[in-house]
Amino acid sequence: MTELGAFLRARRESIAPSEAGLPDNPRRRTPGLRRAELATLAGISVEYLTRLEQGRDRNPSAEILGSLADALSLTVDERVYLHRLLKATAGGVCQGGSAPARSVRPTVTALLARLEPTPALVTNQVGDVLAYTKAYQRLLDPVPENLAWFVFTSAQAREVFPDWDRVADEWAAELRAAASLGDSYAGFMAQELSVAGGTEFTRRYGSSAMLASRTGSQRWRHPRVGELRLSYETLALPDADEQRLTVYLPADEPASAALDLLAVHDDVLQ
């Protein structure tokens, strides 16, 4: 048995049928879920699950691991661990090329300061948040390290973005486009999100036939001011790391008033 197989079996046996939405028969002899039950929940065959648990199959796809992670209700950390167990079991290295640089030019930092009190941020093509204005932090606090990861692994994202499906489609398309153009780090992130984000990510990533929009409007929801609609423009910065500056502007008077209210509240706290 491999470490991957042992982990899958241990998690299967630790989950009560009722936790998976199945009837809990007190006469059951098997602890946790039976293989057949987990296989059905994950959409794979019992034979294949048996091979995985016994270590006879060492190279399941990230999509299958994502389905198993969904069925086992794994946490984000457990999903990442599961993916890395796969890499270790298959003899691969758990990395995917060099991560993009996180430094931002001083002139770009100065530009962000000039944009206050407008929500704005600098990202790279895989969604790493590199710099942002205080106004952006008032919209999304704490600011995540990576937006794609935030959208697919944080429950907060569904609260922040009322149109979560649309936002998720765009981030899946963003990673798909980067990976398709040879960005190995984007491909690595997509593999990890196939497990961490489960079928919500893999379905969108696999069927993506779009490019993420660089301009448009987006609905946000803030715990203090409620829902607001923001227009955005994304501008490419001239550097080798394909950094982008995204600026958010109020799309209507209620949104403008909401941003002003957040700024006033922030000033009072300071």
Image: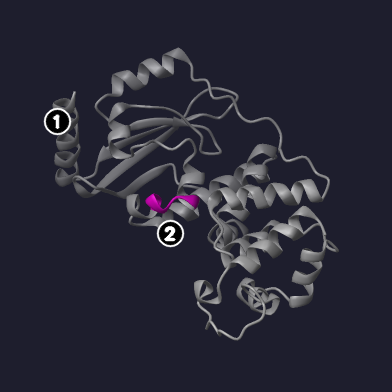
Give the quarter of the figure containing the C terminus.
Answer: top left
Give the quarter of the figure containing the N terminus.
Answer: bottom right
Q: Name the residue carrying label 1.
A: 264
Q: Is residue 13 above or below residue 130?
A: below
Identify which amino acid the numbered label 2 is placed on. Asp
Identify which amino acid the numbered label 1 is placed on. Val
Q: Is residue 161 something one can see in this rendering?
A: yes
Name the spot of residue 64 as percent of width and height, x first: 68, 63
Q: Secondary structure at mark 2?
A: helix
- Which of disc 1 and disc 2 is earlier in sequence? 2
Could you tell me if the residues under marks 2 and 1 are in contact, i.e. CB atoms within 8 Å?
Answer: no
Left or right of 66, for residue 136: left
Name the spot of residue 51 as percent of width and height, x first: 81, 68
Quarter of the image for residue 6 reads bottom right
Residue nearest the viewer, comparing 59 with 128? 59
Part of the protein shown in magenta:
153-157
- Dot 2, crowdedness within 10 Å: few (<14), some or many (≥20)? few
Quarter of the image for residue 69 reads bottom right
Is residue 154 a member of the stretch shown in magenta?
yes
Q: Name the residue carrying label 2.
A: 165
Left or right of 17, for residue 88: right
Q: Is residue 116 above or below residue 63?
A: above
